[in-house]
Amino acid sequence: MTMKNMDLKYFLIIVFPRIALSFFLFCIILSMYIYPGSTYINHDTTRYLFNENFLSDLGRTITHGGQNNFHSSFLFNFALVFGGITYIIFFSLTHKIFNSNTLSKIGSLLGLGGALSMIGVALTPSDLMYDPHIFFNMWIFRFFLLSTLCYSWLMYKHNGIENYFLIGNLIFVIFLLTYVLILVYGPSPRESAFALIFQVTAQKIILFNFILSILVQTVAYSKIIHSK
């Protein structure tokens, strides 16, 4: 592999995901700031409430309270599509770090499924296409859970990765599994204020873990690339 190809591979696997993460967070924060308000059970709020509004509320074309949400939804859905494309590029290349063995290819295919599900969520706002939106939302976390399990095993078997990177990945797996179970068996956010806060808080926690996992994985993969 030439140095030019190595530099491009390093940029797309290590540098670009970090840039994309920063851009994603900027769009989400700005989308929260301009969101006009209302939640599942309270249509009278006048701003985004961190512990009562889902992220998907930002992507609605019309808020729960009936207000136009064009600007916030555009930013949020654009960020999701951009994030999905970033993951498509990421998983199209990460299997090569592990010499494209069978498990790494399976892990990448599952990761691509998660990436396409992210784009699916963006293209199906919950106020317009609720059932497809929920379908894609559920499969984001299922696909990424299975993909992370595959790559955690590969990291465990690789001599060039310290154990604390593997521990970070396994913590992410535990949070992902817990959130998948909450999505399937947890209370409906429409049941009560407590149920809404519980579901919204769980979603924010998994978002925080996604952010950390990207940082952990890019640092770990950087070490592998530099060791070759």
Image (cartoon, grey):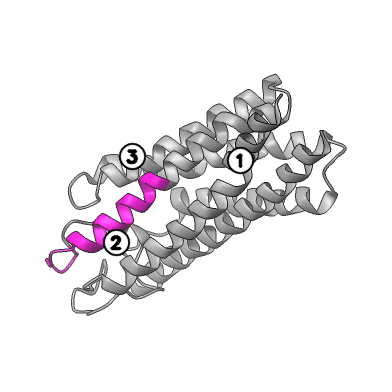
In primary-sequence order, the first of circles 3 and 2 is 2
Callout 1 amino acid: Ile
Mark 2 against mark 1, which lies toward the viewer? 1
User: Do labels 3 and 2 touch, CB within 8 Å?
Assistant: no
Q: Residue 26 — which label?
A: none
x and y percent of residue 200 in the render?
Answer: 42, 65
Q: What residue range appears in magenta?
A: 63-82
* Magenta-colored stretch includes residue 197: no
Callout 3 amino acid: Gly
Question: Mark 2 packing: few (<14 Cα in 10 Å), some, or many (20+)?
Answer: many
Quarter of the image with the C terminus in it: top right
Look at 82% across and 44% down and name the residue there.
161
In primary-sequence order, the first of circles 3 and 1 is 1
Look at 75% across and 38% down and name the residue there.
225
x and y percent of residue 146 in the render?
Answer: 59, 36
- Residue on which the image places disc 2: 58
> Circle 3 sits in a helix, a strand or a loop, which is it?
helix
Cα distance in 3D space between marks 2 and 1: 28 Å
Look at 65% across and 32% down and name the residue there.
4
- Residue on which the image places disc 1: 13
Quarter of the image with the N terminus in it: top right
Q: Residue 120 — which label?
A: 3
